[in-house]
Amino acid sequence: MKIIQNNIQARNIKNAVVTIGTFDGVHLGHQAIFKEMRRLAKEIGGETVVVTFHPHPRQVLAIGTETLRFICSQEEKLKKFEEFGIDNVVIIPFTKEFASTPSDVFIHDYIIDRIYPAVIVVGYDHHFGKNRMGDFQMLNKLGQQYGFKTVQVEAQDIDEVAVSSTKIRNYLWVGNVKAANQLLGYPYSVQGIVIKGNEIGRTIGFPTANLDIPNEFMMINNPGVYACQTVIDGKTYDAMANTGLRPTIGDRAEGDFIIEVNVFDFEGDLYGKTLKVWFIERIRDEVKFSGLETLKIQLEHDREEAKKILSLSRI
């Protein structure tokens, strides 16, 4: 996959089949668009092109930044694009000046004039340009005017729920990772550097890796215990994670969320390493216990429950 930072270079792409968007999560709806793009590109002997933006528009425009969270990082998003068969990614720097570009001018100046699209493919609810005024109807008229084909991919429904990044964020926010994973089409994950904790878990036989995760990716806001998996030195390990305040230990201030991971059957030092953790299913809410011995008994039950869940699911 070719990553193009200056989309003037995209003029060399043959019979470009283009889509446009932020694609947070690269969920099943996005994957349906990519599948249609691959089909069309094969049909006309062309290449697929994703036009995306960085940083995210909401970061630049300061819209809802107090609660702004992302399902995946830019790096993870690019990996997913490649995984789902995209040939080229054009990254447009998003600025306040760029945000003021009218919808038709954006399509003409950034897509038609620089990529020469043969086809533009969008989702069922796609909007673009200043104040998101552009829609498929406008795109279709521009296509007739400038000679490119337009294709709209229908909404993807899972159990009668239309797939969207917003729905996935809402599921993750309350800890319903199982529902979020259904819409993503793969397990939700977080990645962070393992930092020193107070090592109390080690004293009761449940050593944990405490992850330092940037706030914009701290998506799960509902304290709880989750069945997870992680990969260390190329080997997959079952695990369970606690997200929240550790009320039994009582060392966290209100709102000071952490993610700590107990990796099953692993011995070794993870401090300073980057650990990626896939969340499979929520086990229970976070609870304040009377003491460490009671907590240990509950964690033993949690581990057995996590193993049952993970025996039926593998990343």
Image (cartoon, rainbow, N blue to C red):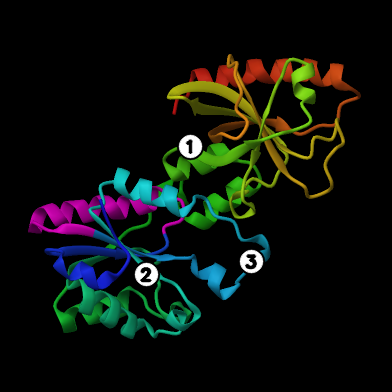
The answer to whether marks 1 and 3 mark residues whose Cβ atoms lie closer than 8 Å is no
Query: Residue 8, percent across and down?
Result: 24, 73
In the displayed structure, 272 sits above or below 173; it is above
Q: Is residue 247 shown left or right of residue 261?
A: right
**Which of the 4 quarters of the picture holds residue 58?**
bottom right
* Residue marked by disc 1: 187
Q: Residue at x 79, y 17 (%)?
A: 203
Part of the protein shown in magenta: 23-48
Residue 32 visible in this rendered orientation of the protein: yes
Mark 2: few/some/many CA within 10 Å (<14, 14-19, 20+)? some
Extreme residue in the right direction: 290
Q: Which is more toward the observer, 149 or 220?
A: 220
Q: Nearer the viewer, residue 212 or 59?
A: 212
Q: Amino acid at mark 1?
A: Pro
Report the residue at 19% width, 67% height from top. 119
At mark 3, the secondary structure is: helix
Q: Earlier in the sequence, mark 1 or mark 3?
A: 3
- Residue 36 covered by magenta stretch: yes
Residue 220 horizontal side relative to residue 94, left or right: right
Distance CA(mark 1)–CA(mark 3): 26 Å
To which residue does mark 2 refer? 92
Prevalent SS, magenta region:
helix
Q: CA distance from mark 2 to mark 3?
A: 21 Å
Residue kind at label 3, given as amino acid type: Thr
Image position of 60 (left or right of 271): left
